[in-house]
Image (cartoon, rainbow, N blue to C red):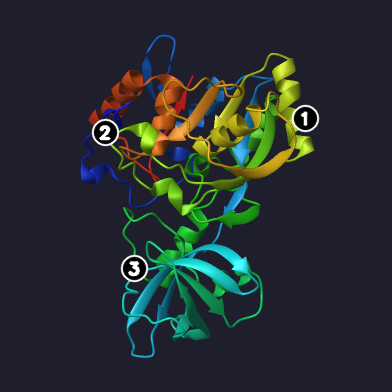
């Protein structure tokens, strides 16, 4: 399949730069795969498409404050993105403006108050702008980043190092049910849910299950290969415990639908279902869901609007068919829906 088939033109003004004033006040496009019908709603209408006995599957990963700033002893400012901890107080990061940095150089890590928090040593240069840093501070990654970190917003959302704006983003670039820290990008479809809306669904007899998939920076990597099959898929860590596996399996056995919130929940469920059943499991997945993939677990999907030529729009196209997805995206553009991470939502029935 040619990657160009995942492409579409989006007016820049439709890229949401901030979230809706209220989480559940975003718009909702309803796409029926059987009829091809498209309906415009608001997210609070979502309950009308989830029935008693269905199971809503949410990704409870928690986004780290993974974006940070540092400065060289020369005063030159650096911007970084925490990727993973590779040892005790040893981080792998993406570092901008690092061309002149030397291995062994000591750099100041800057706190959100603008003051030097601790020193770090650039101990190893890796490929693609990545570095290994030794952090001279005690505490967990989450604790250290809480003192120095800014939300890891994607590059199409424009932000500087203003701590007041960062504080708002730290709250909104996160789901209300976030629990297990480890993501460097948000499972954005879940950001439309409020605690009240989840409670309303529970009261209506909807089952709630949680998976964890720590979204990595690779989720934003565009597909540059001419053919989709030649794209090297990124890896992400996932887990599903026995309690939540039982909730999903009970729903399936009773004839309820599995409604995955976000591509991350879809990827987790389909990775586990590849073994023939939904069971407690953890590991890393490189599953690339693209058109012609046969879904094994997911019946309905709730998702945001994704970047062209991305693995995410390929996944949505696999679920609904690329022609129907492109029809829905054209409708969303014509109706001026807000796109991407802070944008509006779609439910695919």
**Label located before the other in sequence (1 or 2):** 2
**Residue occupying image coordinates x 37% and y 76%:** 78
Q: Closer to the camera: disc 3 or disc 2?
A: 2
Q: Earlier in the sequence, mark 1 or mark 3?
A: 3
The residue at 55%/32% (across/down) is 266
How far is the residue under mark 3 from the one under mark 2? 29 Å
Q: Is residue 142 above or below residue 311?
A: below
Give the answer, above or below, for where 160 lies relative to 323.
below
According to the image, label 2 marks what residue?
7
Query: Which residue is pictured at 47% across the width and 74% down the height?
Result: 124
Q: Report the side of 119 relative to 232 (left or right).
A: right
Disc on res. 297: none
Q: Tell me which label, 3 or 2, sits earlier in the chain.
A: 2
Q: Residues within 10 Å of mark 2 (few under 14, many from 20)?
A: some
How many numbered marks does the figure carry?
A: 3
The image position of residue 264, as x and y in percent, is: 53, 39
- Residue at horizontal 34%, vertical 68%? 160
Please name the residue that numbered disc 1 is placed on. 246
Give how far across and how far down residue 93 sits, in percent.
Answer: 47, 66
Residue 227 appears at what percent x and percent y?
31, 32
Q: Secondary structure at mark 1?
A: helix
Q: Nearer the viewer, residue 23 or 127?
A: 127
* Mark pair 1, 2: CA separation: 39 Å
Q: Are marks 3 and 2 in contact (CB under 8 Å)?
A: no
Q: Residue furthest top?
A: 35
Label ID, residue 160: 3
Describe the element under mark 3 as helix, strand or loop: loop
Q: Nearer the viewer's eye, disc 1 or disc 3?
A: 1
Number of the front mark, 1 or 2 = 2
């Amino acid at each position: 399949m040619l990657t160009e088939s995942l492409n579409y033109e989006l007016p820049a003004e439709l890229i949401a730069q901030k979230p809706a004033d209220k989480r559940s006040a975003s718009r909702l496009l309803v796409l029926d795969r059987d009829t091809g019908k498209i309906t415009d709603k608001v997210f609070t209408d979502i309950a009308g498409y989830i029935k008693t006995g269905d199971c809503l599957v949410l990704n409870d990963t928690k986004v780290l404050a993974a974006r940070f700033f540092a400065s060289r002893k020369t005063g030159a400012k650096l911007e970084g993105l925490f990727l993973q901890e590779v040892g005790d107080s040893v981080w792998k990061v993406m570092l901008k403006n690092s061309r002149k940095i030397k291995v062994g150089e000591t750099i100041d890590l800057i706190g959100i108050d603008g003051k030097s928090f601790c020193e770090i040593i650039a101990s190893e240069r890796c490929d693609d702008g990545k570095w290994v840093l030794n952090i001279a501070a005690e505490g967990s990654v989450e604790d250290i980043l809480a003192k120095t970190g800014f939300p890891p917003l994607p590059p199409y959302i424009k932000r500087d190092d203003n701590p007041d704006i960062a504080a708002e983003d730290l709250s909104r670039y996160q789901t209300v049910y976030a629990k297990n820290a480890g993501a460097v990008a948000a499972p954005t479809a879940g950001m439309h849910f409020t605690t009240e809306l989840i409670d309303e669904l529970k009261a209506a007899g909807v089952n709630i299950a949680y998976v964890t998939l720590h979204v990595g920076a690779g989720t934003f990597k565009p597909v540059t290969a001419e053919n989709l099959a030649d794209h090297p898929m990124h890896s992400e860590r996932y887990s599903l415990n026995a309690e939540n596996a039982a909730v999903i399996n009970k729903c399936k056995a009773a004839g309820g639908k599995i409604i995955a919130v976000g591509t991350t929940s879809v990827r987790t469920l389909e990775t586990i279902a590849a073994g023939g059943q939904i069971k407690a499991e953890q590991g890393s997945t490189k599953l690339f869901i693209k058109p012609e993939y046969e879904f094994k677990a997911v019946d309905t999907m709730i998702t945001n609007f994704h970047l062209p030529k991305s693995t995410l729009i390929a996944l949505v196209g696999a679920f609904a068919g690329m022609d129907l997805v492109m029809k829905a995206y054209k409708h969303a553009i014509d109706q001026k829906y807000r796109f991407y991470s802070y944008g509006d939502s779609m439910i695919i029935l």
